[in-house]
């Protein structure tokens, strides 16, 4: 039977500290599944992270810890490539070349930059405006065919496609045009436990609003017990009228594999207190083996460094071929 060729997939995540269950359901869980059918390249986007001021020691630790966590969550570094973005200068080189073809108007229309500049935030730096070009370089360097994206990243992927087309039209076919990849799991959005109409975020000042992958069992259960719901005392899915209950049902479904309908039947006639505790228990049970594996991996610094060195070499081989072609087409003299 003829096998369909695997597609090249690229995805990246910032080492910005704790990873929430929202990050896991929306992205990381899918990485483990996607690598079974695709040629996957995964990056720790530490260059993107410095658009926000970082403490050097913490950034280094977060980057290494995130590698361990991704491996614990099922990323297979033998079949997939996992590397640190900052360890390959090719990303910065291609970013500069693409920047010369990107218009200020395109960048100023980016929703995230518009939001930051409208708020007149003190750290509204040039990197916040230009990082979509770096994101385009990340993707195009690897002749990426598909990119897992959420709604907030579609605009950036469209810029990458536009820059690829612009370059191809000017210099001849060079870059593959990446397509968005929307997974079914990515549709299950996880919201704040305290404000269930807002996306769950680790930057929330209230730590009860989010659950991280490394939270202890008692912390997870406490956060679920204190989740904002309503006074109706009936458990059914209705995002508009029962946002808190619907969010907890989504979480329960995601971590048990049960459908929302099955969860509604299970909790019919059950009180909110028991429901919330059961959700917390389910999340904690699911995360326990991930946490155990993470502790083993993060303690083995030599192994993490070996994974990153191998990933850098494998990713570098692919990226260099693309960059060499780009330099030649632009007209840079490389010598004999």
Image: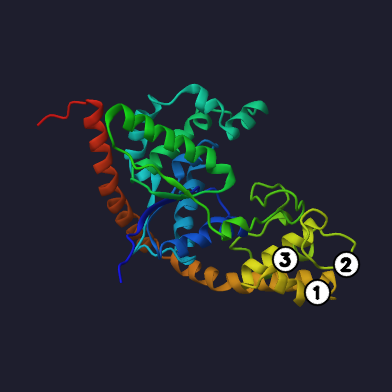
Mark seen at residue 274 = 1
Q: Earlier in the sequence, mark 2 or mark 3?
A: 2
Residue projecting furthest to the left: 336
Q: Which mark is residue 249?
A: 3
Residue 267, percent from left and from top = 78, 74
Residue drawn at (76%, 56%), measured in percent from left and top? 239
As displayed, is residue 44 above or below residue 270?
A: above
Residue 261 figure quarter: bottom right
222 sits to left or right of 212? right
Mark 3 element type: helix
Circles 3, 1 touching at the beta carbon (< 8 Å):
no
Q: Is residue 245 visible?
A: yes
| CA separation in Å, label 3 and label 1 | 13 Å
| Label 2: few (<14), some (14–19) or many (≥20) C-alpha neighbours in 10 Å | few
Q: Which residue is tagged 2?
A: 233
Marks 3 and 1, the one that precedes in the sequence: 3
Q: Earlier in the sequence, mark 2 or mark 1?
A: 2
Q: For numbered disc 2, what is the local secondary structure?
A: loop
Taking the spot 36% from the left edge, 62% from the top edge, the residue there is 77
């Amino acid at each position: 039977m003829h096998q369909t060729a695997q597609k090249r997939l690229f995805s990246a995540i910032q080492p910005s500290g704790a990873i929430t269950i929202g990050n896991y359901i929306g992205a990381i869980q899918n990485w483990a599944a996607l690598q079974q059918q695709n040629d996957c390249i995964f990056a720790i986007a530490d260059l993107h992270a410095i658009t926000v001021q970082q403490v050097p020691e913490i950034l280094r630790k977060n980057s290494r810890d995130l590698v361990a966590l991704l491996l614990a969550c099922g990323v297979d570094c033998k079949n997939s490539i996992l590397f640190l973005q900052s360890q390959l200068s090719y990303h910065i080189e291609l970013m500069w070349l693409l920047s010369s073809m990107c218009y200020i108007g395109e960048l100023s229309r980016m929703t995230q930059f518009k939001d930051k500049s409208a708020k007149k935030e003190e750290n509204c730096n040039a990197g916040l405006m230009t990082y979509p070009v770096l994101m385009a370089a990340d993707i195009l360097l690897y002749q990426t065919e598909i990119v897992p994206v959420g709604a907030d990243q579609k605009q950036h992927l469209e810029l990458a496609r536009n820059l690829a087309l612009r370059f191809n039209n000017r210099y001849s076919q060079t870059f593959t045009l990446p397509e968005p990849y929307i997974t079914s799991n990515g549709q299950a959005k996880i919201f704040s436990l305290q404000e269930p109409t807002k996306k769950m975020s680790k930057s929330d000042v209230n730590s009860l609003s989010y659950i991280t992958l490394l939270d202890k069992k008692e912390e997870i259960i406490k956060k679920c017990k204190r989740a904002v719901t309503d006074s109706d005392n009936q458990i059914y899915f209705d995002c508009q009228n029962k946002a808190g209950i619907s969010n907890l049902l989504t979480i329960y479904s995601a971590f048990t594999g049960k459908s929302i309908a099955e969860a509604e039947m299970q909790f019919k006639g059950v009180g909110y207190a028991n429901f919330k505790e059961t959700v917390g228990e389910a999340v904690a049970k699911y995360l326990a083996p991930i946490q155990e594996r993470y502790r083993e991996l993060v303690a083995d610094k030599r192994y993490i460094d070996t994974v990153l060195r191998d990933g850098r070499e494998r990713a570098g081989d692919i990226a260099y071929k693309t960059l060499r072609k780009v330099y030649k087409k632009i007209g840079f003299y490389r010598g004999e």
